[in-house]
Image (cartoon, rainbow, N blue to C red):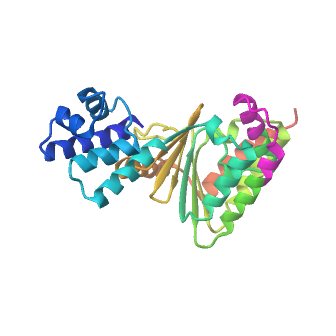
Amino acid sequence: MQSARQRLADQLRQIREDAGLTGRELARRARWKAGVSKVSRIEHGHRPISAADLRTWCEVCGVPPERTEELLAEMRAVAGMWQTHRQLNRGGLKGRQERLRDEYWRVKLSRVYQTKVIPGLLQTSAMTTVYLTQARKEQHLALDDVAAAVEARMQRQECLKRPDARWLFCLEEDVLWYRPGPVEVHREQLRHLLSAMCRPTVSLGIIPRDIDRRGVSPDESFTMVDTELVGVELVSGTLTITAPDEIRLYAEAWDRLWSLAVHGEAARALISEALEVLDRPR
């Protein structure tokens, strides 16, 4: 997020310099009481610029209206990059799932890399209940709408039936073994993965634990939506990346990770191995 803010700040500094203005002169013409220190803090990325101040900056520097609108769009993108779980769940877990459901009907190509959990689009109802119950507890949410949120996520999975979209999933093998809920829930989940692999719109790759990674280390879990954005979910919130050069880095990371994954029967064998352990008498 800081790099995106700095990228915008660098553009504003270049605009000021191209206009032949010092920071002091820009502040004087903008009638900012804080003076040159305000300009300096903005240009060094120490404080975000407001929409009103950005318009003033562009007006003083003689920036064309179209370019001003481009900068405003970039400013809004930077401001929306980081959202805490508290913000995202303001309308409850159900509301968050419904917003995601609507967005997924516009996706053409989804790429999900996961190191920790079964991706939401591949979860069973029981596994979703486990994950969302855990999320409600960890995020200290008073409203208990887990059941409604689970239903909304199951409805979102209908997008997997779209013939005009592709859904790619790349999992580290450990995801198959992590057991956040009861054995029967995990067993059902693994069987569901085997079934999901049969969908013509779904491609599932699994990176084996013992594979020669050729210097490719595991990355943070992320979701790529077409070539427009990347979502990274952290403990306290979600980071949304829209800068083309940063998206390109994630696309390159995806290609490296996807190349390590096994598919088809080899992936089925890894899932079946994890299932076999669960099916053994205790």
Instruction: Place residue 236 in its image quadrant.
Output: top right
Q: Quadrant of the C terminus?
A: top right
x and y percentages locating residue 23 in the rendered image: 19, 34
Q: Residue furthest left?
A: 20
Is residue 257 in sight in this rendering? yes
The residue shown at (21%, 52%) is: 62
Is residue 179 in sight in this rendering? no
Nearest the eye: 24 or 266: 24
x and y percentages locating residue 118 in the rendered image: 67, 45
Instruction: Place residue 22 in its image quadrant.
Output: top left
Nearest the eye: 277 or 120: 120
Q: Quadrant of the N terminus?
A: top left
- Please tell me whether residue 267 is drawn above or below residue 29 in the rendered image: below
Task: Let me know if residue 45 is in the magenta part.
Answer: no
The residue shown at (78%, 42%) is: 186
x and y percentages locating residue 100 in the rendered image: 64, 53
Q: Which residues are magenta?
A: 131-151
Provide the major secondary structure of the magenta segment. Answer: helix
The residue shown at (71%, 59%) is: 157
x and y percentages locating residue 37 in the rendered image: 27, 26
Image-based side of 140 in relation to 217, left or right? right
Task: Let me know if residue 150 is in the magenta part.
Answer: yes
